[in-house]
Amino acid sequence: MQHDLLAHSRRSPALLAFALPVLLASAAGCGDDDDGSSGTVTLRPSADDQTAFQTAFVEAQTGDTILIEPGTYRFTTELTLTTHGVTLRGTGPDVVLDFAMQDSGGNAIKVTGDDFTIENLTVKNTPGDGVVVDGTTNATFRGLTVSWDAGSVEENGAYAIYPINVTNVLVENCEVVGASDAGIYVGQSRNIIVRNNVVHGNVAGIEIENSTGADVYDNETYDNTAGILVFNLPNLPVKDGRRARIYGNQVRENNRDNFAIPGNIVAAVPRGTGILILAADETEIFDNDIEGNLGAGILQVGWETLEMFVSGGGADDPQYDLYPETTYIYDNRFDGNGTSPGSPFDLFGLTSLEAIVWDGLVDTAGLMAGTKDNAMGQLDLCIGPNMGATFMNLDAANGFMNISRDTAPHDCTHDNLSPIVLNPPAAP
């Protein structure tokens, strides 16, 4: 890019006037091959971090590593990266990318190149979404912190770590605080691992939405409105998100008031929810510690119940399946959940909930029409042995008139889902 600007500037004084500041800022902010290895660029704090970073992103070649030295970097607009095979890596503690002055662009960093890795740095104060990877293969987020100095407020960006329409996603050893929608959000993607992260102070801690094949394990989720969400929503290109395994997580005290923008789907998520399943199929939840959530430890609902909560959202998508099916809950440890659920449950006279709560909705129309067959119990909610697990069927279809705590209809098992294997395999 530098050589092109100089060549054209010989013919255009105006372009030369533009080129020189860009080149000087780039020279001040980065150096090629500073560590002696081919394909490595090092960025340092400069008078124009925006130009230095975007220049490095534009000039990056496949396989390059962009190293960022400690310091605080400030940006005024979205950074974009389209090259495949780029690694963006902080070289030590206190590498901070601050977007508080951003006044244009919908994201802090948007990546549309395959084989992308971002690791060991902090992104903060994004007015829109944080790090977005869209429509790619192989995206890794490792050792990334995303936060907002304002705390947990509606004005914060919606999603912090945001892979969408990606095959092979790894999110590990990250911390997210303050997202006004979901801290770690994986949408319309396949082959996903989310592990060893700490998420707190968000509306939704971790959300797997309209995605297929996700392992979410060994995470700590606390002080969110809801800890972990597994959603299928209507009117999205991916219709059949399924096969999420949620295990080995600490899901505790997710009792923060919902601060999402009113009208957003996540604004309907009840405060105090540990794990929420909405219309997703083949969800396996096991070996989690689910404690101190004032609402349900695990809440499973269909779209029709969500519509009650949001006063009629509408699911005008004929290909959308409104019902969560083939859920298997076992070997979890529950303690102190459901003691003060609040809205919207209090609207129906429910002042306490059990550890596991199901709205009771089933696709009776589909069963009668023959589009679904439950002869072998494939569609059932199965609840195996758990420690401290009480149960509640809300009977939402009948206005919560015949609430049941009988677990006998759910004394069943489903086949265990297979672990997710990333290609290429994730680092240990």
Image (tube, rainbow, N blue to C red):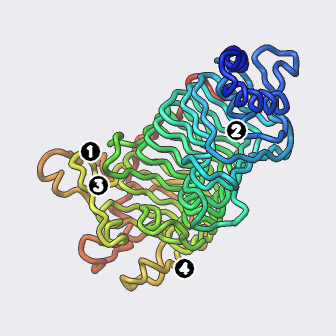
Q: Which residue is mark 2?
A: 142
Q: CA distance from mark 4 to mark 1?
A: 36 Å
Task: Check if mark 1's residue and mark 3's residue have beta carbons within 8 Å.
Answer: no
Residue 370 shown left or right of residue 356 in the figure: left
Where the N terminus falls, by quadrant? top right
Identify residue type, mark 3. Leu
Sequence-wise, which precedes: disc 3 or disc 2? 2
Q: Which residue is mark 4?
A: 339
> In this rendering, which labeled residue sits more in front, label 2 or label 1?
2
Q: Residue 286 — which label? A: none
Sequence-wise, which precedes: disc 4 or disc 3? 3
Where is residue 287? Give x, y as percent: 59, 52
Q: Nearer the viewer, residue 29 or 157?
A: 29
Sequence-wise, which precedes: disc 1 or disc 3? 3
Q: Nearer the viewer, residue 376 or 340?
A: 340
Task: Check if mark 4's residue and mark 2's residue have beta carbons within 8 Å.
Answer: no
Q: CA distance from mark 1 to mark 3?
A: 21 Å
Residue 190 visible here? yes
Instruction: Report helix, strand or loop for mark 3.
Output: loop
Residue shown at 64% from the left, 58% from the top: 221
**Which image quarter: residue 205?**
bottom right
Q: CA distance from mark 3 to mark 2?
A: 34 Å
Q: Which residue is mark 3?
A: 322
Task: Check if mark 4's residue and mark 3's residue have beta carbons within 8 Å.
Answer: no
Where is residue 364? Give x, y as percent: 19, 57
Q: Nearer the viewer, residue 217 or 106?
A: 106
Where is residue 254? Give x, y as percent: 60, 67
Identify residue type, mark 4. Thr
Neighbourhood count class around disc 2 (C-alpha, 10 Å): few under 14, some 14–19, many 20 upward: many
Q: Residue 376 — which label? A: 1
State how many labels appear.
4
> In this rendering, which labeled residue sits more in front, label 3 or label 2?
2
